[in-house]
Amino acid sequence: MAVSQLDRRVAMAPMMDWSDRHCRHFIRLLAPRTLLYTEMIVADAIVRGDRGRLLDFDASEHPLALQLGGADPATLAMAARIGAERGYDEINLNVGCPSERVQSATFGACLMARPALVAECVAAMRAAVAIPVTVKCRIGIDDTDSYEFLLAFVDTVAATGCDTFIVHARKAILAGLSPKENREIPPLKYETVWRLKADRPGLTIVANGGIRTLEGAREQWQRTDGVMVGREAYHNPYYLAALDRLAWPAHAPPVPEPAEVVAALRPYVAARLARGERLHAITRHVLGLYAHRPGARAFRRVMSELAPHAGADFAVLEAALRAAEGAAPLRLTA
Ligand SMILES: Cc1cc2nc3c(=O)[nH]c(=O)nc-3n(C[C@H](O)[C@H](O)[C@H](O)COP(=O)(O)O)c2cc1C
């Protein structure tokens, strides 16, 4: 995909343990144009580890960005090159994760305090690949949270030629809060992201954090270049389906019904099971298929109870579907 064709009006956030290839394959059935992100993958693991396991994806997942974690320019450059060779459409650097494990390796959000190093990393990555290299960051960290700090960070990194920043509109607290708390406790400050876009109109600025309604997304589109949505899209995938169509109405195929989504999953599930994967690993991401619809609880219950069993196969999805649609009485035996 050519660089200029990456359309950033809607992206689904990188989410560790959540946005794996099974999740992305499922989401793509509902959101045909949304830019998808992998979970953060540590650059060193790509360079030294099992690349197939870490990086393989299904062609249907395009457009797809690979998010890297790391702080060593040479390692990041190598990992970026490997990602580009494998067909990813974008390489993104994580400068927003506050977990202590990540901090002890001195990457993630704490890198915001080291803009020159981030710039060095991004420059090395850009030199290694022809696809876009982007940065996902916070609006600040700890007490270093002035607008001037954010602007200086962005300017330093943008001087390398990087022109796209996804900004989670809340600062990270590096000590004392868990990653989960860090996604809820410091208040969101969209104004900071909007000010950044106003001051640097030549940069592509994507807003992230707490964008949970179509109205909220519309508001961001008026002041930024796009939205990245995480938890709401994961728990309620039809929200992402609606957002995708709101962003690209001219290209919108009809939104499939849950039964059509399940039917579309069949060949994928069969192929993955044939490779020895467990049903639950694939279908744990589809629990929100009926979110905010009648049948939601029944669907989740059947999936949660039956999918984890060894040997569980596609019949579990069909049973969950029947339960949700109220078509047949439930018999919960594995
Ligand atoms: C389970 C989970 C895992 C996450 N893992 C990552 C990650 O690997 N890389 C990253 O940049 N952000 C990660 N995040 C943060 C999200 O990308 C996003 O910035 C955050 O959830 C705010 O967006 P939201 O309010 O739309 O969920 C994670 C969030 C969640 C909920």
Image (cartoon, helix red, strand yellow):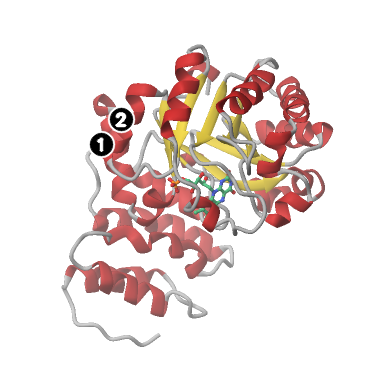
Residue 45 is at least partly visible in this image: yes
Q: Residue furthest top?
A: 202
> What x and y, as percent, mark residue 190?
42, 33
Q: Picture quarter containing residue 253? A: top left
Identify the residue position indicated by label 2 in the image: 219
Asked if residue 181 is positioned above or below residue 127 in the image, the reply reads below
Query: From the Cβ of disc 1, is ligand 1 less than 8 Å away?
Result: no
Asked if residue 28 is positioned above or below residue 5 in the image, the reply reads below
Q: Amino acid at mark 2?
A: Glu
Query: From the Cβ of disc 2, is ligand 1 less than 8 Å away?
Result: no
> What x and y, as percent, mark residue 107?
73, 43
- Report the residue at 24% width, 83% height from top: 330
Q: Are marks 1 and 2 in contact (CB under 8 Å)?
A: yes
Q: Quadrant of the C terminus?
A: bottom left
Circle 2: is it few (<14), some (14-19), or many (20+) Cα within 10 Å?
Answer: few
Q: Amino acid at mark 1?
A: Glu
- Report the residue at 50% width, 78% height from top: 311
Distance of label 1 from label 2 (alpha carbons): 6 Å
Identify the residue position indicated by label 1 in the image: 215
Asked if residue 7 is positioned above or below residue 13 in the image, the reply reads above
Q: At numbered mark 2, what does the secondary structure look like: helix, strand or loop?
A: helix
Q: Nearer the viewer, residue 67 or 117?
A: 117
Residue 20 is at least partly visible in this image: no
